[in-house]
Image (tube, rainbow, N blue to C red):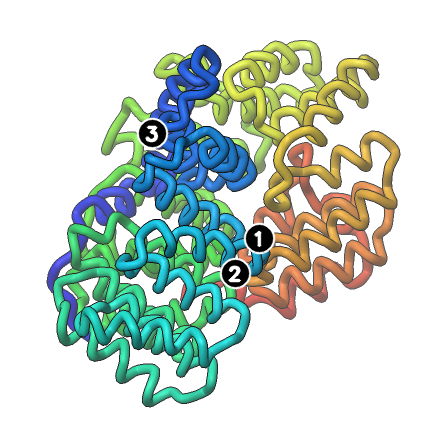
Amino acid sequence: MKIKKFLVLVALVLVSGTIFQVAAQGEDKITQAVMKVYDDYIAKNPNDYNTLFMRSNQHYFNGNYDAALNDVDRTIQLAPAKETELLFDAYMLRAKLYELRRNYDAALADVDKASTIDPASLAWVDMKGKIAYAKGDFETAAAQFKTILQRVPRNFDAMYGLACIEADKGNSEEAMNWVNQAVGIFPAEPQVYLNRAHVQEQLGKYRDACETYLIAMSSTDDNGESISRIFDLADNHYDDVIATLRGVTDDNPRVGIFYRVCSAIALKYNHYGQALRDLKAITDNNLLEYPSIYNDVAKCLYQLGDYDQAYIYANKAIASDPTLPEGYVQRSLIERRQGKGNNFTTAINTLDQALVIDPNNVSALKEKARLLIEQKKYKEALPLLDKAVAAEPENTELLMLRGWLNKSHLKNASAATTDFQKVLSLPDDDVTSLRGFALHELGRDSEAAAWAEQKIKETSATGGESYYYAAALHAAMGNKAQAMKYLESCLANGYGGLYDIKINEAPYVNLAPLRSEPTFNMLINQSQLNFQER
């Protein structure tokens, strides 16, 4: 497959190495500012139904569906009957929110109310079709979508709806006919490619779907949606995504962005050997030159145990941009392990260079604290963690580390408990929430074990990260037999961080208690492919 155009914004985000992080941070700040304006205004004008509705839409966009429902309920209660356009939109939004909750009867009731306000609108016809489809009532759904096509024959949303129905019924040819027809009519519209890729996913055509998402990247109107979908697809179909991307790099060997996408996905799932192959294709052939690429090469080599080569690339990252603290942090980690190890002074000096650039850099503060803890300089480590937590008060890794330090070495149980309780109060989206570790430190081991098992069920097994955290948690709790079972699953699912598995002892998450187990090295030896460049 040959693809010639690429979304510039996506390319810049990918090559910068942040994969949405920079954009997300910017969006978070903007969103917070927007919500504050809404909140302040509504606090003073609680019955302003127009502003309430605008805020409900913003909550919906932000994914805060409960808050959106509260605001749209109040909008409908307060808006007078003459505000027909506003009420139509409000009923339609509430129908979407009810649909998300699978409260289909309530959703249909709101669609019916919207239809009485504007019988000619196709929006409620489309929503009625979507709700019927969600309920599994394919006959009604198809009738609604065909009604739309009778009035607007080139409506690609209706074509997509019919394609989804056929895909769910197992009619592959009919499903693809609908989405391909839409692509033929609207070849410059990114949404038709996203629709086609979703239908391909429904049909189990994962490699085709990945190719279609890559085509969608060529549109400047894509807004990064296609790359986001590729990452989502990799959650459960990693091998298909990587195979597709590798095929694309074979067809386009001088297009660095493809290698970058491939390496970014491999890094997300801890496949450092696979990521290294694609990153070195970039650096060896001078396809792209960004400090983050050199830094990622250094990270991969570090995880694979090649500290001297990792050091070379860390220095390249710093030379590429000496103003970025990340390069110094990565080099300090490498320096600590070079030669015979225990190079604390050199590593700390490098971290101090990062802190000159950014005195509040959380990564540098955290790693310096860890190095001091390794040297039993506990009282010197605490102010660094205090400063880091002040910079990022909801960073669970920092809270757990400070809590552990206070509990285990500074004998400040109350301060430790405060940090552990704070972790329990924060969102528990994935294993990095460290909720189970906080429960363990608070003496609630049965809940901690249940948390680990639940996260394994909720999280993609690709890359083995959830199993890694479960193994580390059970190791900390002294359940070595269970921890070893989780470690076996971790490796079976491709976890590729040899450093994390064999060497890392940094508090808080590590496998140190397992390394004396009789079968530990045997498991590592059986998983050597995980730790090879390929």
Q: Is residue 527 left or right of residue 288?
A: right
Relative to 493, residue 204 above or below: below
Please give the name of the residue rendered at 57% of the width and 48% of the height, measured from the top-left corner.
Answer: 499
Assign a secondary structure to mark 3: helix
Q: Is residue 350 left or right of residue 465?
A: left
For residue 197, which quarter of the picture? bottom left
Position of residue 87 measured from the top left corner of the image (x, y, whole percent): 38, 41
Q: Which residue is mark 2?
A: 531
Please give the name of the residue rendered at 34% of the width and 26% of the height, measured from the top-left corner.
Answer: 30
Residue neighbourhood size for the residue with mark 3, other residues' Cα within 10 Å, grouped as few (<14), some (14–19), many (≥20): few
Relative to 337, residue 402 above or below: above
Please give the name of the residue rendered at 40% of the width and 83% of the height, measured from the top-left corner.
Answer: 166
The amino acid sitting under disc 3 is Gly
Q: Which residue is mark 1?
A: 101
Residue neighbourhood size for the residue with mark 1, other residues' Cα within 10 Å, grouped as few (<14), some (14–19), many (≥20): few
Is the C-beta separation of discs 3 and 1 under 8 Å?
no
Nearest-to-viewer mark from 3 and 1:
1
For residue 530, which quarter of the picture? bottom right
Assign a secondary structure to mark 1: loop
Q: Which residue is mark 3?
A: 26
The amino acid sitting under disc 1 is Arg
Nearest-to-viewer mark from 3 and 2:
3
For residue 456, which quarter of the picture? bottom right
**Could you say which disc has been placed on residue 522 in the image?**
none
Q: Is residue 467 left or right of residue 84?
A: right
Assign a secondary structure to mark 2: helix
The amino acid sitting under disc 2 is Phe
